[in-house]
Amino acid sequence: MIRDVVLAGLAGGGAGALAGLAVRAWLARMRRGALVPVGPCALLLAALWAVACVLVAAHRVPAVWLPAQLVLGVLVVAGSAVDLAVGRLPDALTGPAALAVLAALIPLPPLTLGAGLLGGVVLGGVLAAVHLAAPTALGAGDVKLAPSLGAPLAAAAWPAPVLAVVLACLGVLAVGLARPAQSVPFGPPLLVATWVILTVSLTGG
């Protein structure tokens, strides 16, 4: 079993590194995209994919969840990179992300998939209300990103979307306190929080 886990981690990490290079090229060609550093994209996606593959190989996460974890890993890297680089989440990213996440959730049982779809709509609606009330606090790109994150979170566990938003807010607050003169985008903390909460939820945490 240890051998299988190690091989899964190596395979996932290698594939993730190559996918990270592809993500960087995609962002550079994307309408309203950005030119971002190569190394962080490749290394971060390699780490996320390696963790996902190891957890499945170790039977800590059901294999049916692997497509969603891989797609979410791409979204974490792409969304964080472009938001940090140019301070926005372009429609050319958030639109395909929603379709990709939905496709990745199709292997799940119908009730679980239904819960995920409902969770995506609810999280999108909540963030849309916040955006309308305080446009400077939450961008339209974050609202368009929400369904792609709320769907896998709600499919894993109903409290997960709430926990992810709370964790993201704490992250923004911590960075804001450490660098009060710097504007902190909400997208990267929300993406990272989604990855963490989803992984913890799937492993039984």
Image (spheres, rainbow, N blue to C red):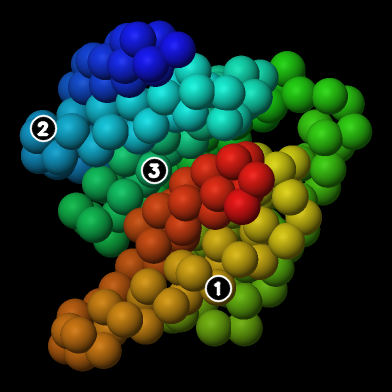
First in sequence: mark 3 vs mark 2:
2
Could one spot residue 96 in this view of the protein? no
Query: x, y percentage for residue 76?
Result: 39, 43
Marks 3 & 2, CB-CB < 8 Å contact = no
Distance between the Cα atoms at labels 3 and 2? 15 Å
SS assignment at label 2: helix
Residue 77 image-quadrant placement = top left
Residue wearing tag 3:
76
- Residue 128 vs residue 135: left or right? right
| Mark drawn on residue 166 | 1
Cα separation between marks 2 and 1: 30 Å
Name which residue lies at 49% across and 18% down: 57
Q: Where does the image place residue 113, in percent across and percent down from the top left?
A: 80, 32
Which of marks 3 and 1 precedes in the sequence? 3
Q: Which mark is residue 205?
A: none
At a point 61% along the width and 18% down the height, the residue shown is 63
Front-lying residue, 142 or 67: 67
Q: Secondary structure at mark 3?
A: helix
Amino acid type assigned to the residue bearing label 3 in the image = Val
Q: Nearer the viewer, residue 11 or 83?
A: 11
Q: Is residue 87 visible?
A: yes
